[in-house]
Image: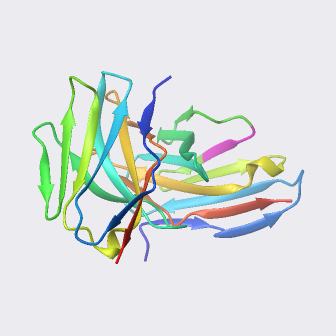
Amino acid sequence: RKEVEQDPGPFNVPEGATVAFNCTYSNSASQSFFWYRQDCRKEPKLLMSVYSSGNEDGRFTAQLNRASQYISLLIRDSKLSDSATYLCVVNWGGSYIPTFGRGTSLIVHP
Amino acid sequence: DADVTQTPRNRITKTGKRIMLECSQTKGHDRMYWYRQDPGLGLRLIYYSFDVKDINKGEISDGYSVSRQAQAKFSLSLESAIPNQTALYFCATSGSTGELFFGEGSRLTVL
């Protein structure tokens, strides 16, 4: 069974805080990795792809550690609008079968 | 217009009824997926299709069937709905990058 594990949270942080989420995966043959954001009762939307060298998009930084089989998402200077569930997605093999973690809930408060 | 369209958006039905959820896309992608989301369980893969002639079971296919009528259309059927199939259902497509594009979801309630 291919597992993708996330801490469900919730992570409750004040505005301006830095928060980090991890996601572990069980299959070392995993090919590609993504973070999605999902607002309540809405469809997930791509936040970032995760590259081997790590990548940054504004306040968001994603990293991949293949040796330890996890990916991470760092959010700096949290905004109220960052409140959402963050889903880790791992694609297996060359056929890209996407498997989701259960998501991590983030609540940013004033 | 949305790239991935699901119908119906909401449906309430009774146990034993047949239900079809439809999905169409304008992305031109070959790969299409049906997921189900339950509170606290994330998204679980029901079926996926990599082209019109390719249909594969996902993690939780029991009680469901699918039809890939065309590259752009992928339908999910519940032949005899039961209450534990009450959930939010998402259709998605992906291209060569692996990024998923979702429909807005179909909320199904089985009484």
In this rendering, would A87 be left or right of A41? left
Q: How is the image coloured?
A: rainbow
* Count of picture labels: 0
Q: Tell me, yes or no, if residue A11 can be seen here.
A: yes
In this rendering, would A69 be left or right of B102? left
In this rendering, would B19 be left or right of A4? right
Residue B19 quadrant: bottom right
Give yes or no for residue B64 being in the magenta stretch. yes
Closer to us: A62 or B3 = A62
| Residue B11: % across, % down | 74, 67
Closer to us: B2 or A75 = A75
Closer to us: A56 or B50 = A56
Residue B98 quadrant: top left
Image quadrant occupied by the C terminus of chain B: bottom right
Which residue is at a point 76% across and 61% down the rendered structure image?
Answer: B109
| Residue B41: % across, % down | 57, 45
Image quadrant occupied by the N terminus of chain B: bottom left
Which residue is at a point 43% across and 36% down the rendered structure image?
Answer: A5
Q: Main secondary structure of the magenta part?
A: strand
Give yes or no for residue B29 being in the magenta stretch. no
Q: Tell me, yes or no, if residue B99 can be seen here.
A: no
Residue A41 quadrant: bottom right
| Residue A87: % across, % down | 40, 50
**Highlighted range, magenta:** B63-67
Closer to us: B67 or A1 = A1
| Residue B27: % across, % down | 37, 60
Which residue is at a point 66% across and 68% down the rendered structure image?
Answer: B8
